[in-house]
Image (tube, helix red, strand yellow):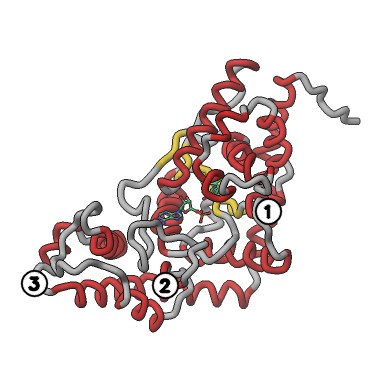
């Protein structure tokens, strides 16, 4: 059975881009493989966080994963910091990673803005991500397009490690969906939908109420041509709506182009909003129930135990290959 690993940061609000680019793949993979899905709270620390808010967001994200369809009976769901091997594995990998390769990471350039005050954790962030993945002997890492470079680095680190110390680490492959890998902002379809966007009209959160979804969709930025056609270069706004609609409704893009060919943008916007609402209403309801029952805590305890079992073995392989003395056990 294939091992799958992926993670999301508990910052900002989980949005439709995360859902279509990542979580929908997780749900698909939980049927086919042995999935590990992680709330990467250690990664969140790479930027300043309010401690209380971070705690809340971490639980919220774990709950949302389940509400959105991750089944704890099929996949392992846990919080990164509950599994100390992640931090330790990251240290081992830091000792084989190179400044030059980290300097090329686009996410660091964007978030660090080239400033002297940029955090060291932000710089080494991709190494922690590599540890996340490699500690599970993961075969497949489902992510959105923006994470491709980090997975490439993960592969490079695994290969370098194996070259130096013998075949210890499995080299994973990224799985980037053909559609949905890059859902664009509703207020600016030139840039990806992002939880750190300045304006809330950029995204639809998974818990957003129907009224607000409709309002944001009606205001979504398109173009002045008023012809419904899929063309990501020339018509990013309309193409983004078509893509969202298609991914949620299951209708093909060409069928939708046909359907809205005489209708103009108004109808496309309203019906895309309706498809989103239909999809997110049960997620919102399940979320509410999960919060009431508090069952997420049990799920996370079980998840962390299983994650510790798996990572313990891989970490010991790494430690031993690198020349560390195994801890004495009596
Ligand atoms: P993040 O929210 O950056 O922690 O990302 C969590 C997951 O969602 C990662 O796999 C990302 O690649 C994916 N993701 C984030 N934003 C988008 C987007 N606008 N479209 C598609 N996937 C996304
Ligand atoms: N860096 C990823 C993001 O920003 C989150 C992440 C951390 C991740 N560790 C991971 C994704 C391991 C996949 C696998 O979206």
Question: Is residue 106 visible from the viewing direction of this image?
Answer: yes
Which residue is disc 3 drawn over?
262
Q: Nearer the viewer, mark 2 or mark 3?
A: 2
Residue toward you, 80 or 290: 80
Residue 22 on image: x %, y %: 44, 53
Instruction: Say whether mark 1 is within 8 Å of ligand 2.
Output: no
Element type at mark 1: loop
Residue 86 on image: x %, y %: 68, 41
Residue 214 on image: x %, y %: 34, 79
Rendered residue at 37%/53% (across/down): 182
Give the total number of marks visible in the rendering: 3
Res 245 → quadrant: bottom left
Measure the alpha-carbon separation of dots 1 and 3.
50 Å
Which residue is disc 1 drawn over?
45
Element type at mark 2: helix
Which residue is disc 2 drawn over?
201
Rendered residue at 65%/58% (across/down): 300
């Amino acid at each position: 059975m294939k091992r799958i690993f992926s993670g999301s940061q508990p910052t900002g609000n989980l949005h439709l881009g995360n859902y279509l680019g990542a979580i929908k793949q997780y749900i698909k993979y939980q049927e086919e493989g042995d999935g590990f899905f992680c709330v990467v709270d250690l990664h969140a620390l790479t930027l300043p966080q309010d401690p209380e808010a971070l705690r809340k967001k971490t639980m919220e994200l774990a709950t949302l994963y389940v509400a959105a369809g991750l089944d704890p009976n099929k996949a392992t769901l846990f919080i990164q910091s509950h599994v100390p091997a992640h931090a330790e594995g990251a240290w081992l990998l830091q000792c084989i990673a190179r400044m030059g390769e980290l300097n090329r990471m686009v996410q660091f350039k964007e978030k660090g803005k080239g400033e002297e005050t940029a955090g060291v954790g932000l710089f080494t962030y991709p190494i922690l991500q590599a540890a996340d993945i490699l500690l599970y002997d993961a075969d497949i890492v489902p992510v959105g397009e923006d994470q491709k470079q980090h997975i490439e680095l993960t592969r490079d680190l695994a290969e370098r490690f194996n070259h130096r110390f013998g075949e210890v680490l499995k080299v994973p492959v990224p799985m980037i969906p053909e559609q949905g890998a890059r859902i664009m902002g509703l207020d600016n379809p030139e840039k990806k939908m992002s939880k750190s966007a300045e304006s809330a009209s950029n995204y639809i959160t998974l818990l957003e109420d129907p009224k607000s979804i409709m309002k944001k969709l009606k205001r979504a930025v398109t173009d002045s041509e008023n012809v419904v056609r899929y063309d990501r270069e020339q018509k990013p706004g309309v193409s983004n709506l078509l893509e969202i609609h298609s991914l949620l409704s299951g209708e093909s893009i060409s069928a939708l182009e046909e359907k809205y060919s005489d209708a103009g943008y108004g109808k496309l916007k309203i019906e895309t909003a309706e498809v989103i609402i239909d999809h997110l209403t049960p997620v919102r309801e399940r979320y509410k129930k999960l919060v009431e029952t508090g069952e997420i805590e049990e799920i996370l305890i079980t998840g962390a135990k299983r994650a510790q079992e798996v990572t313990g073995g891989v970490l010991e392989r790494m430690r031993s290959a690198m020349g560390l003395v195994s801890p004495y056990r009596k």
